[in-house]
Image (cartoon, rainbow, N blue to C red):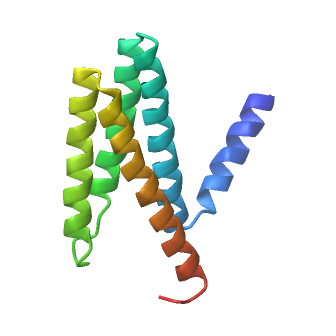
Amino acid sequence: MQNNLYAQYKAKSLETLTNGEIIVKLFEEVSKQISTAIFLTNQGEDVKAFNCIAKAQKIISTLTLSLDMSYGISLPLSDLYDFLHGELGKAVTAKDTALMKSSLSLVDELKVTFRQAERQARAGKF
């Protein structure tokens, strides 16, 4: 019963998010998955790390597919997402935590940028 109530609450809270807030949440999840993959790689848990990176890549692919190419910023973002997707693939294949950390830094910068843009949009500054 409690699990069902929590699931309903979670679904309802997601429905009330703006598009910008959803993008920030997605970047938060990508960041979490990469951080977990770094930890797991350091622990020798390569399969679990691979699964975390695969989840991060799936979210990045979703972000790429959600771009509205009628906006000028969409093509550079698409290229950036493709780059990030590829770097994560290289990092997990090579078990390269330095490359994972570099990708994590980029994701965190994107998350901060989108969070700021969302705040400005809500304040009517766009």
Of residues 32 and 6, the one nearer the viewer is 32
The image quadrant that residue 71 belongs to is bottom left
Residue 104 x %, y %: 40, 43
Of 74 and 15, which appears nearest the observer? 74
The residue at 44%/42% (across/down) is 30
Question: Would you say 43 lies left or right of 12 here?
Answer: left
Name which residue lies at 59% across and 80% down: 122
Name the residue nearer the viewer: 46 or 71.
46
Q: In which quarter of the image is the N terminus?
A: top right
Residue at 43% over, 27% down: 38
> Would residue 32 appear left or right of 69 to someone viewing this image?
right
Residue placed furthest toward the bottom: 125
With 44 as the anchor, is 65 left or right in this view?
left
Pinpoint residue 49: horizontal percent, then vertical percent.
39, 21
Measured along the vertical axis of the image, is residue 88 above or below residue 39? below
Q: Residue furthest top?
A: 44
Q: Which of 30 and 16 is in front in this view?
A: 30
Give the left or right position of residue 28, taking residue 104 as reference. Answer: right
Give the residue at x 67% y 54%.
Answer: 13
| Furthest residue toward front | 98
Residue 40 on image: x %, y %: 46, 18
Residue 59: x %, y % from top left: 37, 44
